[in-house]
């Protein structure tokens, strides 16, 4: 089961996997009379990702004693994602954080904490992107753009959790002479 998968799955194989898992979307028979097309791959991956994460939430409960499910989940994940310095792994981390940022704010009644958590996830994603860009030798402009986006998100996260508490203690200002 170990190894690295470099060739992305086809739309048809993704659809078959989702069908086997009972999570396949129903294709429009007019638009897709011959089944899924290559352009459907991102959508199908999103459905598969959601199904996988929902199943993981049920089967790998970190509150379980001992947390065997979590250990096995991480072991299975790491069997496919093997290289810690790999740019693909950094993209995976960034994408996961972006999904978390979006998912955190899906509710119609977001709290300031949800919004701050979303902004913090965006900041972390931006910093990971900056790291990945620097490792692959991207231009300093591209790296700085990722850092700037991360800093903006980090400031928004900090403002979101401090500005709503009028009586909260603020950090002491230092005299600058």
Image: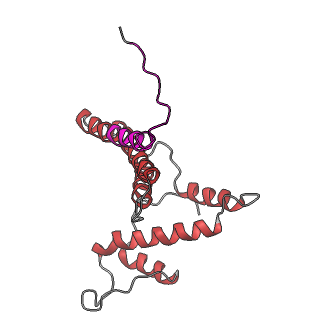
Q: Residue at x 41, y 62 (%)?
A: 109
Q: Is residue 10 above or below residue 4?
A: below
Q: Quadrant of the N terminus?
A: bottom right
Q: Is residue 110 magenta?
A: no
Q: Quadrant of residue 44?
A: bottom left
Q: Is residue 41 left or right of residue 83?
A: left
Which portion, as a residue range, is magenta? 151-175
Nearest the eye: 61 or 5: 61
Q: Is residue 169 magenta?
A: yes
Residue 83 point in image, percent of width and height: 50, 47
Q: Identify the residue at the far top of this view.
A: 177
Q: Residue at x 58, y 66 (%)?
A: 56
Q: Is residue 48 left or right of residue 57?
A: left
Q: Is residue 39 above or below residue 90?
A: below
Residue 80 point in image, percent of width and height: 53, 58
Q: Is residue 116 above or below residue 20?
A: above
Residue 156 point in image, percent of width and height: 36, 42
Q: Identify the residue at the far front of this view.
A: 167
Residue 28 point in image, percent of width and height: 30, 88
Nearest the eye: 45 or 173: 173
Q: How is the image coloured?
A: secondary structure
Q: Residue at x 51, y 54 (%)?
A: 81
Q: Is residue 137 left or right of residue 107?
A: left
Count the numbered circles shown.
0
Q: Quadrant of residue 127?
A: top left
Q: Quadrant of the C terminus?
A: top left
Nearest the eye: 102 or 27: 102
């Amino acid at each position: 089961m170990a190894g690295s998968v470099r060739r992305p799955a086809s739309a048809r194989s993704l659809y078959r996997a989702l069908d086997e898992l009972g999570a396949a979307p129903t294709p429009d028979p007019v638009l897709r009379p011959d089944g899924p097309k290559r352009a459907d791959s991102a959508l199908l991956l999103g459905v598969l990702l959601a199904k996988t994460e929902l199943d993981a939430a049920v089967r790998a409960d970190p509150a379980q004693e001992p947390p065997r499910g979590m250990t096995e989940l991480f072991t299975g994940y790491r069997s496919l994602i093997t290289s810690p310095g790999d740019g693909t792994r950094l993209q995976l981390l960034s994408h996961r954080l972006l999904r978390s940022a979006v998912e955190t704010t899906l509710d119609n009644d977001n709290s300031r904490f949800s919004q701050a958590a979303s902004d913090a996830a965006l900041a972390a994603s931006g910093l990971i992107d900056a790291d990945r860009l620097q490792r692959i030798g991207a231009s300093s402009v591209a790296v700085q753009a990722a850092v700037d986006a991360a800093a903006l998100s980090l400031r928004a996260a900090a403002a979101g959790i401090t500005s709503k508490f009028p009586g909260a203690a603020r950090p002491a200002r230092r005299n600058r002479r």
